[in-house]
Image: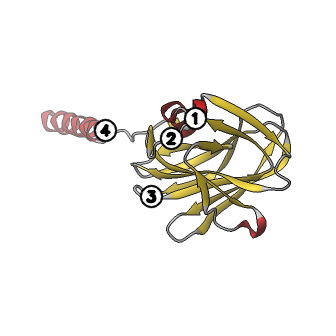
Amino acid sequence: MKKFIGLALTLVLLAGCSKKDKPEPVVYGEEDPLPGFLARSFYSQETFVWINELGGMAQYGMSFVPLVNGKINSLVIKMPAANDAVKVIFWDKTTRTKVRVETVKVTAANTVITQAITPLPLVKDKEYVITMITDDFYARNKTGNGVGSFPVISGNIKVTGSVSGSATNELFPLGGSSNQYFGDCSFLFQRTE
């Protein structure tokens, strides 16, 4: 009987130890790099609204590098006009190829719209570009149209530049600006490592 009780006690202790030895998985919170980027780069000092003023659609957004492995779970867009189908494109900056194309329904002007997507994995230290195709956007400047300095770190994302390009044929955006940020097109990033 003593052997049975001793064996039972040993099994209970071992079972308890194995649960404690197994670490709980770490779940990181989501982060939107745009607010931190705008604050640190001072591109939020002056904001201009552009609605159908350029005579056509164009691409606007930013290039960025994740500082850790992670994934994008949602898109975040704010526009000065509603739009039923804003095309958002993720690009591999090195190869200039599309990684993912999503469509966002912006239901109200001047409102932050967050839309969940199938998670898009991102690799640490790889450079990507996010753009939206639109003719309605915000142009954000430093006071006096001052020149910004890149890169800008915002959480686990390093923003490497402001980008713009033609929407015709959805070609990789080759333009950009060192003294303005066009469009409020961002994402919710979640660290996975």
Q: Which residue is mark 2?
A: 148
Comparing 30 with 149, the one in front is 149
Farthest residue, direction front: 144
Disc with the residue nearer the chain's start (3 vs 4): 4
Left or right, 140 with reference to 9:
right
Disc with the residue nearer the chain's start (3 vs 2): 3
Secondary structure under tag 3 reads loop
| Residue at x 45% of width, y 50% of height | 66
Q: Position of residue 154 (x, y in %)?
A: 46, 38
Q: Could you tell me which quadrant the N terminus lies in?
A: top left
Q: Please, what is the three-letter code of the amino acid marked with disc 3?
A: Val
CA gap, disc 1 and disc 2 = 8 Å
Q: Which residue is mark 3?
A: 123
CA gap, disc 2 and disc 4 = 52 Å
Comparing 72 with 112, the one in front is 112
Query: What is the quadrant of residue 112 in the picture?
Result: top right
Q: Position of residue 94 (x, y in %)?
A: 49, 68
Secondary structure under tag 1 reads loop
| Residue at x 40% of width, y 48% of height | 67
Dot in front, 2 or 4: 2
Q: Which residue is mark 1?
A: 43
Vertical arrangement, residue 126 with respect to residue 21, above or below: below
